[in-house]
Amino acid sequence: LLGAKGFAEALSSTFAAVAGTDEPITVTQVVIDGLDTVQERAGVLASDAVLIRAVVFLQQMFEPMGAIVCRVGSSIMSVIIPGSDSRQLAGEFEQFRVRFDASSAQILALSEISRSAIKVSVGLASTRPGVEGQMKTHDALLAAATKAVQAARTAGGDCTKTFAARSAA
């Protein structure tokens, strides 16, 4: 599992590898809010168990697609997926959220913590080759994914939001 530095290097090299091709690349930000509450009420092991389940589900679901799963913050994971765009992946990440929610509910129930204590917000952004105004740098792609996850968190969490470049029509 790569950290923040590994994520930055992987994003830069993946972006460079698909530059000039018709292949899209998607960056997804996954934020798990509420881990501090779990830690305060049930301890570090319970909080870690919730986080580890998220990482395992992300790896199981997306690494077979060629994705790179990274932990870039204490409760933030980033996933780089070459060859797919956010329109194709939004449903897959929603399935991740549902699967994770059901699994983490078991851990929370053991500690008598409300299921609503954990909120998972997902933000996706993709390049769209051939679309005017499309993101031309990996920094712009990361910024768009960050905006998408912020929109998901602003909407109350427990949802998936996408950001896609649009042509100026």
Image (tube, rainbow, N blue to C red):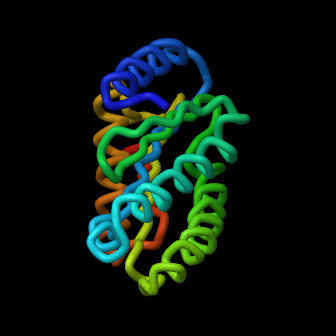
Left of 106 or right of it: where is 37? Answer: left
Instruction: Determine the residue positioned at 45% across, 14% down.
Output: 13
Snapshot quadrant of residue 99: bottom right
138 w.r.t. 107: above or below: above
Number of marks:
0
Snapshot quadrant of residue 42: bottom left
Q: Work out whether residue 127 can be spotted.
A: yes
Task: Please tell me which residue lies in front, 84 or 9.
Answer: 9
Q: Which percent across, then down, holds residue 39? A: 32, 67
Instruction: Determine the residue positioned at 57% across, 34% down.
Output: 81
Task: Please tell me which residue lies in front, 111 or 118.
Answer: 111
Snapshot quadrant of residue 48: bottom left
145 w.r.t. 8: above or below: below
Q: Which percent across, then down, holds residue 27? A: 46, 39
Instruction: Determine the residue positioned at 73% across, 35% down.
Output: 64
Task: Please tell me which residue lies in front, 41 or 59.
Answer: 41
Q: Which percent across, then down, holds residue 156? A: 34, 78
Instruction: Determine the residue positioned at 40% across, 39% down.
Output: 71
Task: Please tell me which residue lies in front, 19 or 30.
Answer: 30
